[in-house]
Image (spheres, rainbow, N blue to C red):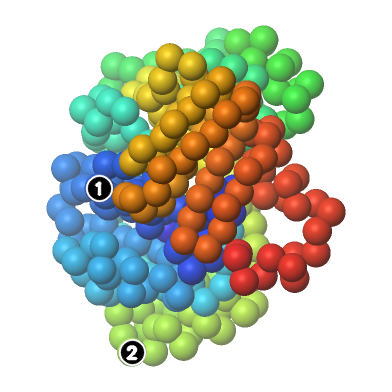
Amino acid sequence: MAGGPGSRFWPVSRNQMPKQFLDILGTGKSFLQHTFERFASIIPKENILVVTSIHYESIVKEQLPDILPEYILLEPYRRNTAPCMAYASYKLLKRDPEASVVVAPSDHLILDEELYTSTIRNALDYADNNNVLITLGINPNRAETAYGYIQANKPKHLSVNGNIAYEVKTFTEKPDDELAQVFFNSGEFLWNSGTFIANLATIIEELDNHLPDVSQLFREGKQVYYTPYEQPYIARVYDECKSISIDYGIMEKTDKAIVYPVSFGWSDIGTWDSLYAVGEKDRDGNLARVSKSLLKNVSNSIIYCKGDKKVVVASGLDNYMIVNTDDLLLICPRDESVYKGLFADLSLNDLAEYQ
């Protein structure tokens, strides 16, 4: 899934070049490229689909020259993750009804690649022969409000090829501070990684059961997939299709959900603070993504500068952000770095050219 706007990483992530296509980690590769390579070590490259916005087609082709053109699925409008999954699932259904599928975001950080690939293989093997929807759950290390939470029914555990998994009791999307603390303290909740594994038949069945209107729209296109008529049909479907997430549309309702706790080192790198949490910092707690800086009495701050020549000089800052791009300089406290919070009092029209 590679169609999101990445707005919480503004001003580096913009509508025309969102986070999944950027090298925010400084590795020389974008999040999308890392994700593609990760899955190419698990399955053949020709079995990988990317669902993205029609506006990002050329970027995907440039960054992933090995992907089959017919497996770049282009959404004319953003409709959240459930229509995205439905489109890919019905297109796959025409090619291989017996397939098992991983539905994964394209912009997450995985630290232990070997453990991640073995986890995905285990889950796929289990999904081949079981009518379940597996979600990967991350053991939380703090009360985080930026992630969704999964409550595990811990008395009812089962084995995914020797690894413990649990029936799911509840899904909760991005709680407030107080509720996140309750979840963390209880020991019953895991962070929702946004990654789902199931066989295709189960996905289709649960789409039919819980999102029948969405399912029917994509089912009716079975004759046009892999033909020149596919894109015009999808444009009409997305005109009619409601916007809803996999979590709200399916996972909160299904009785087939199980959560597989994992510990391969994960972050969705969805905010500047999440980058700060995983990034290497200097002795004063500063995360610097800049060729050269002169910092005096600066601590616990983020300094990010595009380009190789500019020197960043700062003094007397604690818990601040300095983000410099080709056309914009952002300086603000780190706790105001969320786009909507920072500009709550400004008209979006004032910032239209910078979005």
Tell me what residue is drawn at x 71 percent, y 17 percent: 181
Dot 2 falls on a residue whose secondary structure is loop
Tell me what residue is drawn at x 32 percent, y 66 percent: 60
Tell me what residue is drawn at x 56 percent, y 10 percent: 155
For badge 2, the amino acid type reads Pro
For badge 1, the amino acid type reads Gly
Q: Label 2 to label 1, Cα distance in Å?
A: 35 Å
Q: Position of residue 20 (x, y in %)?
A: 41, 53
Name the foreground residue: 19 vs 220. Answer: 19
First-in-chain label (2 vs 1): 1
Q: Is residue 317 visible?
A: yes
> In the displayed structure, does residue 17 sit left or right of residue 70?
right
Q: Position of residue 286 (x, y in %)?
A: 48, 25
Dot 1 falls on a residue whose secondary structure is loop
Which residue is outermost to the right? 345
| Residue 11 falls in image quadrant | bottom right
Q: Is residue 149 visible?
A: no
Checking the image for residue 228, the label placed there is 2
State which mark lies toward you, 2 or 1: 1
Answer above or below: position of 354 versus 305.
below
How packed mark 2 is, by other alpha carbons closer than 10 Å (few <14, some 14-19, many 20 or more), is: few
Answer above or below: position of 172 versus 83.
above
Do residues under tags 2 and 1 come within 8 Å of each other at their CB atoms? Answer: no
Q: Quadrant of the N terminus?
A: bottom left
Give the labeled residue for mark 1: 28
Checking the image for residue 290, the label placed there is none
Q: Quadrant of the C terminus?
A: bottom right
Count up the numbered dots.
2
